[in-house]
Image (spheres, rainbow, N blue to C red):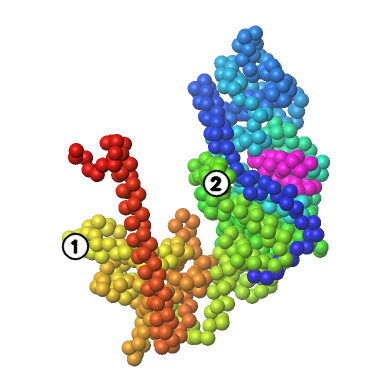
Amino acid sequence: MGKLVRISPDLPSDDKLQDIDNFHRANETSFGQIRSLIKILHKTMRDNEGNSSLIERFDELTKIIYCKAYDERDHKSNFIFDKSKSKQDYDRINEIRQYFKELVNRRTELFPIKFREINISDETVLQLMDILAGYRISETSEDLKGVLFEELIKNTFDKGDNQQFFTPRPIVEFMVHMIQLIGDNLQGIICDPACGTGGFLLYVDKYIKEKGIGSQVQLLGFEIDERLAWVAGINLDMHNAVNYKVKCLNGGGSLGKEMRNNVNSIDVIITNPPFGSDFTDQESLSYFELGRNRLSRRRGILFIERCLELLKPGGLLAIIIDDGVLNGPSNIDVRRLICQKSIPFAIISLPATAFMPYASVKASILFLEKYNEHNFFGLKEGTFFASAETVGKKPSGDPLFKYNKSSKRLELDSDLPQILTTWKNIMEDTFFSEEKYGSIGFISKITNIKDKLFTKDGYRLDLAYHHPARHEAMRALKKSPYPINKLNEICDVSNELVIPSRDFAEEDITYLGLANIDSYMGTCNPLIINGSSLKSAVRRFKGGDILFARMRPELRKVCLVPENIEEGFASSECIVLTPRKSLAGEWLVLPKLLSILLRSDVAYGQLVHMVTGIGRPRINRQVILNIKIPVPPINEQNNLLELYEESEKISNSLISKSERALEKSREVIGGAHKLLVNKVLFGHFHYGIKD
């Protein structure tokens, strides 16, 4: 995998990493209380302000919550929001309206004219005050105050014209920590050029306060939407952020010409830009290498180029991008630009559910260092790749919890803390060890941009292309002493499709679905079903054929059909392979040996970078047929298979013993249960119910 050189002399110490393993932990009750509070506030607004729009209700709730935060800060006791026998309702209402005007006058730059008054009825104001009186925002952790704000937003906004949606807090925190681990690099000007509600800037502010380095940082946010720019500003203000500025950029936002005034001026950019919509402003497009001479280009693509322009040489970028940027054939120019102008030092794959319910998109976090003559960090020996299967949230957007047996508490179910720990360990080690880090991440050297194969493959930067299994398979095939054949040279393929409900409606048939093929093991469990129950097309097979499942190839669902099955039918997601014989009547490759090889890392490594699809990932038929297989002489094949079958017998014996032991354990606990119940019913151990 290559040596990982640590160029920065100042490695992060353990005290800076004390919260890595638990920064996602959360209290389920607190999250539940916040969600319940927001639902109550929304319901109150909806019931009382029935003629208002969602956006109008959002604006007014934002103002009231802002007042609540400052009420606790300003008054310490005798809060305006608290119910008091000495105050009439109209006095409280007038007081809160006047108080909001006072807050606006304190920071007029935060409040565009249209957001400077509370525009709901007195009755609604009073009810909202009464609801919020029971909560102390200042007594909640900084993180949960942010959750309250973003839960409010989540339930109000969907994606807008500029494709805004909101980054889950565990991902925000992860990106900030990843940057911080690189030589204390949360310093200087830290910017989010598509800041939305200010989530990234808010967490950076929280972190620098904890570390006592606030004076060394200036927070800078840009937003194309005036309402979101307003929310970001008051969100930061509500959380006592210091040294920050949020600016609304009309027209093209951060992609417009006004932003070019900030070129080469920013130290760190952390952002989740709107990558789902097209940017069509011709004048602005002409300034982009990736937009020149085009009628349109995806905003997310242009944001990569703009961010690299904004950074100082040696500056760092953490950006969430659509996976199509990393591997899509239409984005070769984007990847070439990335490799020309920066060093990708980490690429983290996110699950397809990461941004639900706003969007269903497969995305990754790309960490780049802009080229500099003397790169202070520069992982020139390789790029860290990792994949997060969970990020602490359900597709609904609600938190996803798991129970930690060691700490005996609930915590968010997320792979991100473990990825952070792995990244920290890699940085502190001079040499990369696959045994140590292979379960959660790996280092892969991104070939020089002038390399012919890398160029031919379109400068792919996705995790699958650089997966260790792929490189290991390529190396293993080169070292094999035996002839190499493609699968389509040693097998025939059956393409016969039938519809059992039409062709075998009155017959019982043998059927093998994907669920009936065991992962990794090569065993299958055929079903006998009536043909009328299968409405979709299936593939015909016979005993001795090999079934190769196209869907989720990482499960290695490849099986040899038992010889005693005369005929059967398999899911259309399977390819039916019939091993060939030579003219002399000998197998080119023994069928059982071939099925084992097709489940091996050598075969999977040739497929891993060719899997397509998100919800139901599968492999193309032609890719499977191009799998390369080493073919030993037939006598060596027989010897190899004989050795394998000896181990197989031992394995089957152990499985049988474990099954018998499991059945015995059930009998023991069942008997104990029966004895206990009889003792409770009859006062003594009694078998049966007769006297």
Crowding at label 2, few (<14), some or many (≥20) Cα neighbours within 10 Å? few
**Residue 495, above or below 367:** below
**Residue 664, above or below 186:** below
Outermost residue on the front side: it is: 684
The reply to whether the C-beta atoms of the residues labelled 1 and 2 are less than 8 Å apart is no
The spot of residue 352 in percent (x, y) is 52, 52
Query: Which residue is more in the foreground, 283 or 63?
Result: 63
For image coordinates 81% across by 44% down, the residue present is: 216
For image coordinates 39% across by 72% down, the residue present is: 650
Q: Which mark is residue 485?
A: none
The spot of residue 582 in percent (x, y) is 36, 88
Point out the stretch of residues depicted in magenta. Answer: 186-212
- Inter-mark Cα distance, 1 to 2: 52 Å
Q: Is residue 231 magenta?
A: no
Residue 2's quadrant in the figure?
A: bottom right
Q: Is residue 203 magenta?
A: yes
Q: Residue type at mark 1: give it.
A: Glu
- Give the labeled residue for mark 1: 507
Residue 302's quadrant in the figure?
A: bottom right
- Give the labeled residue for mark 2: 404
The spot of residue 644 in percent (x, y) is 42, 77
For image coordinates 47% across by 75% down, the residue present is: 627
**Residue 10, above or below 636:** above
Camera sees residue 471: yes
Q: Residue type at mark 2: give it.
A: Asn
Q: Quadrant of the C terminus?
A: top left
Q: Quadrant of the N terminus?
A: bottom right
For image coordinates 73% across by 33% down, the residue present is: 240
